[in-house]
Structure formats: structure tokens, C-alpha cells
Image (cartoon, rainbow, N blue to C red):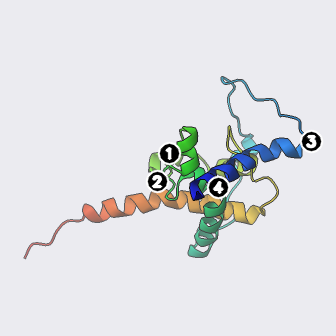
Amino acid sequence: MLKLLVILSALLLLDFPAAAQGGQTPAQPEPSAQYTIPVEAAHKANPVKPTAESIARGKKLYGYDCAMCHGKDGNGKGDVADDMKLKISDFSDPAALKDRTDGELFYIIKNGKGQMPPEGDRVKPEALWDLVNYVRAFAGKKAAPQEKDEAPKKSD
């Protein structure tokens, strides 16, 4: 029952931008059309330091708006993504975001991408930067255990 509620909520969120435009369906880009991020947006620096407080705030927002598709652990295996058969990047893989700037992530979160709805102006910019910091933290969580496993063992 909860899974059905989550799916219905996600579908409503995906349809919200169209409803907000007075019932007009926005033109969908051609499948071959490239998603481009303006250069000035890509070069925008993150003004929020990735502190524990920032990451905690980003985690809270992520749980409300992102986990249903991107997965609780950022692995791209959220319930809605599985049900809709969406292929979503695994943020816990350091390679997934290594070529993306914080400015690009901010732009994508704010404006949406493909089937991902935009946060738009309903969330303050500082909260979006917290979300960028939290998404970046997924890759660090995966790398840390590997480093511990590779630590040399002491011999007595």
C-alpha cells in the first residue's frame, strides 16, 4: 500500500509542471536532442561548505524529493525508478559524478532533466546547495570502507 502511495505521489509530481502551465503540455525534446547546461551555470561555485550540518539538511530534502527515484543510498534503485524501469546513475560510484561540477548538479536539480521534475523556486538556493553536498557525499561513503579493507595488517 505504501509503495502504491509513493508511486502515485511521484506521478503527480511528474505531472505538476504541466498542470502549472494551464494544462499545456510542454514540448518534449527529440530523443537525440542533447541536454545542455549554460556555461555560466556550470561554472557557478558552491557557496555552501559541505559540513555535517549542510549534508544533514541535504539528506532531509533528498529523503522527501529524491530517494523515491534515486534510491535511499543514491544507487539509482528507488521504488519509482524500478517500477518505471528508469536507468538512473549510481551516485555511490565515484565515477558517476566526477565529470560534473557542483554548478551543473545545482542546475539539474533546480531545472530538472529528462523525466526528473525541477525543484524550481519552491526550494531556497541554499537548500539546493545542501542537496548538492549530500549527493556528493554518497561517493565518499562507498570509498571509505574500501580504504579500511586495504589497510595493511600489523604483524606481531
Mark 3 → mark 2, Cα distance in angstroms: 38 Å
Quickly name the residue at label 2.
Answer: 92
- The residue depicted at 84 percent of the width and 34 percent of the height is 25
- Label 3 element class: loop
Label 4: element kind: helix
Q: What residue lies at 62% left-to-right and 71% top-to-bottom?
A: 54
Report the amino acid beneath label 4.
Answer: Leu
Of the image marks 3 and 2, the number of the one nearer the N terminus: 3
- Direction from residue 20 to residue 4 in the image, left or right: left
Q: Residues within 10 Å of mark 1 (few under 14, many from 20)?
A: few
Q: Position of residue 140 (x, y in %)?
A: 45, 60
Q: Where does label 1 land, which residue? A: 96
Asked if residue 98 can be seen in this view, the reply is no
Figure quadrant of the C terminus:
bottom left
Foreground disc of the pair 3, 4: 4
Residue 52 location, x and y as percent? 56, 74
Q: Amino acid at mark 2?
A: Ser
Residue behind mark 4: 5
Closest to the observer, 27 or 1: 1
Pick the front one: 27 or 45: 27
Quadrant in the picture for residue 124: bottom right
What amino acid type is highlighted by mark number 1? Ala
Percent position of residue 128, x then y:
70, 60
Residue receiving disc 3: 22
Q: Earlier in the sequence, mark 1 or mark 3?
A: 3
Foreground mark, 2 or 4, reads 4
Residue drawn 24% across the image and 65% down it: 151
